[in-house]
Image: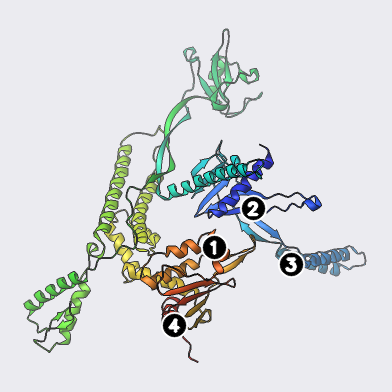
Amino acid sequence: MNYWDKREAKVNIAMALVNSGWKIYGYKNDKSDAMVDYFSPADWDGVAEKNGYVLCIDQNSLHCSGLERKEYIGGNATYKSNARIQKLEAMMRDAASTDNEKASCAVLIEKEREKDGAIEKYKVIETYPTFTFSNPKNCSWHIEKDGEIVGKGTGVFACYQSNDHIEENRIERDTKINKLISRFEKVLNDTDSLVAEVIQVPVTVTKLVEKDIVSITESDMVDGLTFVMKVGYTHGKNKGNKYTLVHGERHRWFAQLGKNNKPSESMSKHWHLSLERINEFLSKGHIAIVEFVETTVYEEKTVFKKSIRKQPVSNAPTIETTEIIIDEVVEEIEATTQEEDINVIYYDFKTNEKDTEDKEMTTNSIDDVFSKFDSFEISNDQRISSEDMDFCQEQEHNYKAVLNAYVNFKNELDKVTHSSFYGVMSKYDYEKSLLEIKNSFINNICFYFQQNYNVTINNEKIMKKSDYNVTFQEIVDDIFVQLDGFSFNEKAEKEIKDATKEMFKHGDKITIKNNKLVLDGYFAHFDSIWKEYRLSEKVEKIFKSLQLFDSGSLTNNEELKLKYCGYSNSSKLDNYDRYTPNTLINVKSIKFFKNGKMEIEFNTHQQAQAFATEYCGYKKVAV
């Protein structure tokens, strides 16, 4: 297969990737023109990205990693600046110019050069994603994420089919392309269900150890006796060279060790030394006897394993515990006031009906009642569900088990004299591993609540303040602090509304006409590279707000998401036609405009007004 066939195969794959929601980089359209005998076929650099995964096809180097494609800007400004510099330089060379005039010209030339340097010469039109590896050996593609290869394989250039104008050949080509795309998607789906874990892999290495020997005897002159040069001699006997003793049929000599510590067979790298000469070099410290020692070192490697526990479905209902807590407070208040014989009128907190036996209550008695609420502490098992509790307890059990294993392992190592062994766990590696174990424990719990209840949690903040004795109760306490007094559902609702309100800080972006709400949120833009209109990612925030407003659900509206969201869906031409959603009760139609506006038609004017006010921050201005 020649270069042009491989090029065409990559272009065929690029088009299929775009249809599957991938963003491709470095694509050039076919600009050939047979009328003027101009040949410039389509081309693609082989880099694509989707959901944080980077696909590299036919990448044998890291040249395209983070590459910036630039569009150079011509202009009259640079030309004028260069013309001024030439005139000033000619004036400096003029014999009639005085010294002061030459000095002034030098200052002006420097200013012009600074001005020329400030002129924008280009603009970046495309920045490739960063990847860490070129294609592995014997592979034509690989997929990586977060600096780790998660999938690799072959089959790229099989997507070329000669004579693809014939229907049978074209069908065969498309079948191969679809199979390859399916392999890419399978890598993404499988990796999303895995959990990254850093493990220690034992690796056997050979290290050179110098022996404290100042002389040898004839009995030591056996095959394998090796020394290293500590100083340099002539005829290629350089410092650092290693030589090993080799016996032949009649003679013995020292052969220089090359790659993989194999003795050289070249006569120019042989050295004939007597026992007396070797002892002389040893006594002067010009050579040192060495031996090769095999030792085991541990290298960190990231592996991906299937998650042990399946995450529960999102939007799980919270447990209402108010009644239980209030009953306990009432019982505590009753017991206290009976002992102190205070005249207090009691309230039924469950029905908000007061006891009418006594209508007088002193201010001090009211303060006593509410002080009981201030000192009352709500335990975690009352704030989270039993399923949440089981997950958190399981994570803490695993965390303590791993932590204890590391501590015990370090204690056992400290009992052994291992000064002669290389690669044993250092203090830095030990402390780093403990820190990663602790942070993984915190991340697992935070991620669980984020996924289940659709809330944002700052896990970095919790990790910084927590030590190794952290418990899941403390982590849950910090999570509730971040909720700012809201329940999980309330916090999730607030975040959805705040995300929408952020887009419409200024009231002039919202217009209500009868039952129609027009939002100017720059929802559509023109893609100058692909020459097409495309919806922005902000539309998904509107859809989440509409779903919450319509049904109270905190999840995405899958109907609208599948129609409008995603790389391939966002560029469809029918996105700008009026659409009637089947899964929204209060919304009659949705329509996007190429000028960036969006129109939502509700059933009534009151519904349009309510959504604009509560979810978009609309404030009606008095006229």
Where disc 1 sits, the SS reads helix
Which sits in the foreground, 243 or 190?
A: 190
Residue 622 percent across, percent down from the top left: 48, 90
Q: Disc 4 designates what residue? A: 605
Q: In this view, does 79 lie above or below 23?
A: below
Q: Do the residues labelled 1 and 4 touch (CB within 8 Å)?
A: no
Counting residues from the start of the chain, the first of labels 4 and 3 encountered is 3
Q: Residue at x 81, y 67 (%)?
A: 80
Q: Disc 2 designates what residue? A: 27
Amino acid type of the residue that numbered disc 4 sits on in the rendered structure? His
Please rate how many residues cluster around mark 2, counting C-alpha atoms within 10 Å: few if below 14, some from 14 to 19, many from 20.
some
Measure the C-alpha gap from mark 2 to mark 1.
Answer: 19 Å
> Residue 593 occupies which quadrant of the picture?
bottom right
Measure the C-alpha gap from mark 1 to mark 4.
Answer: 29 Å
Residue 594 percent across, percent down from the top left: 59, 71
Counting residues from the start of the chain, the first of labels 1 and 4 encountered is 1
**From the viewer's perspective, is the residue at label 1 or at label 3 nearer?**
1
